[in-house]
Amino acid sequence: MPDVEEKLTVRIHDPDGTLCVLYSGHLRQDPDLLEKITERMKARYPQLTDADSTVPGYVFYCRHYTWYNRYNQSGDGAPKDVHPSQLTTSTCPRISQRLPELSKEAREKIEEYQNIIQDLEPLIEEVVRLLKQQLPTEYEIQAAYGKVLPLHGLPPGMVFTSLVVNVAVATDGHRDSMDMDICVLAAIGDWEGGEIVFYELGVVIDLKPGDICWFRSTDITHFNLHFKGLRASFVLTNDGAGRRWVENKNGWQPTGHVH
């Protein structure tokens, strides 16, 4: 793998000095890897063909493979002398709703989820390496949730509990308010246009195949411009509600029954 060279890495701060975007183009030095991943994605997703996002009524394909914790019942105030498995309420009849749970899309296509993780493994490894090297504190924050998922739910080496696959995506301006502060974006293919815009910063980045872009997705309005060509992007993040699981297992740890 090519080194993460400082000359190929750009940091963008807001007027207060807060780091908002970290952008690395070091994978452009490994075109063979990018071509291999692109071919795997084309085989995996037949929707990945040449597209034109300016076409009226344009739609794109998206998959969310995510460990969610945001919909779960809190154990705050639960009695310590009753095991959680014996507690039910009208709003939370399922015990599993007290634990992080894999998204419906991933559960229904579990083999697809496992295969896509395997296909993208070299790219994900580079994202993790970049984060660990350039932003070690952020790395520890993001890694904490995945380390304590039930049944060791993440593959070895994974830091992010959410992988979003966007095929030929063109988005409106938005913030991802339920992320764990940040996300990491990478794209593969061959296209024209599609620049990513960070509205409040007044920054437009011409994202190239293999480029890795870390940014504060909860705080910055972002979207990509229209494009033409073959393009797939991958977003790695964590559910912000995962913090509750890290801190005290959604409030069930103080009961003494969940560790």
Image: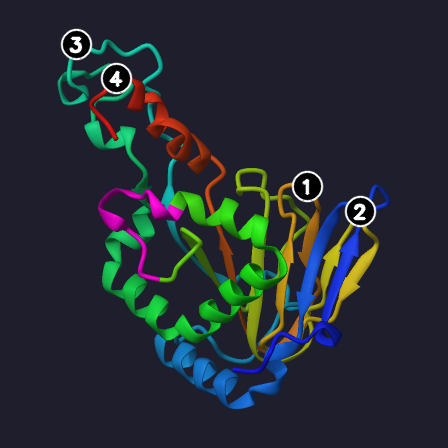
Q: Residue under circle 3? A: 81
Secondary element under disc 2, as helix, strand or loop, is loop
Q: Are marks 1 and 2 in contact (CB under 8 Å)?
A: yes
Q: CA distance from mark 1 to mark 4?
A: 35 Å
Give the class, few, some or many, for how many residues have Cα within 10 Å of label 4's Cα (few <14, many ≥20): some
Q: Mark yes or no: residue 213 visible.
A: yes
Q: Residue 200 shows which numbered tag? A: 2
Report if residue 151 lies within the magenta region: yes
Q: Residue 219 shows which numbered tag? A: 1
Magenta-tinted stretch: 146-156
Horizontal relation, residue 189 to residue 99: left or right: right
Secondary element under disc 1, as helix, strand or loop, is loop
Disc with the residue nearer the chain's start (3 vs 1): 3
Using the image as rendered, state which of residue 65 and residue 238 is in the foreground: 238
Q: Hey, what amino acid is under mark 4?
A: Thr
Q: CA distance from mark 2 to mark 3?
A: 51 Å
Horizontal relation, residue 244 to residue 4: left or right: left
Q: CA distance from mark 4 to mark 2?
A: 44 Å
